[in-house]
Image (cartoon, rainbow, N blue to C red):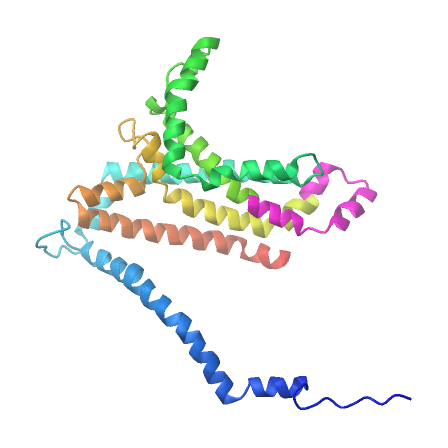
Amino acid sequence: MTMQTPLSRDTDPARSVARSRRPGSLRRTEGMYYLFLVPALIAFTAFVVAPACVGIFYSFTDYLGFGQWDFLGLENYRALVSDPAILASYGFTLGFAAVTVVVTQVIALTLAIALAKKIRFAAGLRSIFVIPMVISGIIVAYVFNFLFSNTVPALATSVGFGPLEQSILGDPNLAWVAIVIVSAWQTVPGALLIYTAGLTSIPEELYEASSLDGATGWKQLRAITLPLLGGFIVINTVLGVKGYLGAYDVIVGLTNGGPGSATSSVAMTIFGGFTGGDYAYQMANATVFFIITVLISVLQLAATRGRNLRLA
């Protein structure tokens, strides 16, 4: 018969937990917490919150960005709702964001499912597909600008394909297509990584059990893959909408808002006003745009919250 030796005072887990809960330990923990929190909070307030509050205040004035100003109340906001250029920029931005987020999610999910299969060179292909994510958006835009302006028309002319013999960047009805293509090309890798992580979290036993029940690949996709990827689809959709609503560098590099103002986004309109002596008016525009972006994000999360809980 063996005898169990009692735990010493230094190795007893209960005593260790009790010591960690002593007032002195709690005070040290709280001190470290504030040591990390306070500097970050001060920096965030100084460089984000305070400038935003100042900008919102100036949106109620006629401030030009320099010199004197007078208080106007809601005049800038009233002018926004009747400004054709502002309304056109919102229409383009919302439509572009909606189309691009759908295109990006479909392509990224398709690639993620394909690369999750046991195929040759899958690891190498994943590495290749994420390269666009690390390239600057303005560089990508200038490269594709050259392709759409020179290479694509030359190839179309050589094969006699009339619709593309002229650059689509010069067509007010097709320039947005080029922006969607380039934006999707650059953002698919990020969504691909998130979907790949989601696919690896799905137990392989589910697919094996469904195969024994006679489920085909399409049925497995509908009944297993898509439902269990619901949370990841929500994440990619929210991130995509947020990013596309603020699109700027890709549009500047491709069309600079043209032809005319056909592809002028809200972000371009706001920045253009800041440098064109229209500071207060565009600050009102920026405030409205911020509210719309927040509302869209809240509606997205509210519409999918119940689904996320069920998946969890």
Residue lying furthest left: 68
Q: Position of residue 304 (x, y in %)?
A: 54, 53
Where in the figure is residue 278, as x and y percent of width and height?
Answer: 17, 45
As drawn, the residue found furthest toward the right would be 1
Q: Is residue 160 visible?
A: no
Residue 214's place in the image compared with 287, above or below, is above
Where 294 falls versus 11 (above or below)? Answer: above
Kindly indicate the quadrant of the structure image that contains residue 109: top right
Name the image quarter holding the C terminus. bottom right
Which residue appears at 66% of the width and 86% of the height?
Answer: 14
Q: Position of residue 152 (x, y in %)?
A: 43, 18
Magenta residue check for 232? no
Residue 18: x and y in percent read 60, 87
Classify residue 19 as left or right of residue 138: right
90 or 137, nearer to the observer: 137
Residues rendered magenta in the picture: 193-222
The dominant secondary structure in magenta is helix
136 with respect to 192 (left or right):
left
Q: Count of labels shown?
A: 0
Quarter of the picture containing the N terminus is bottom right
Q: Is residue 213 magenta?
A: yes
Residue ID at (45%, 79%): 30
Residue at position x 25%, y 36% in the image: 85
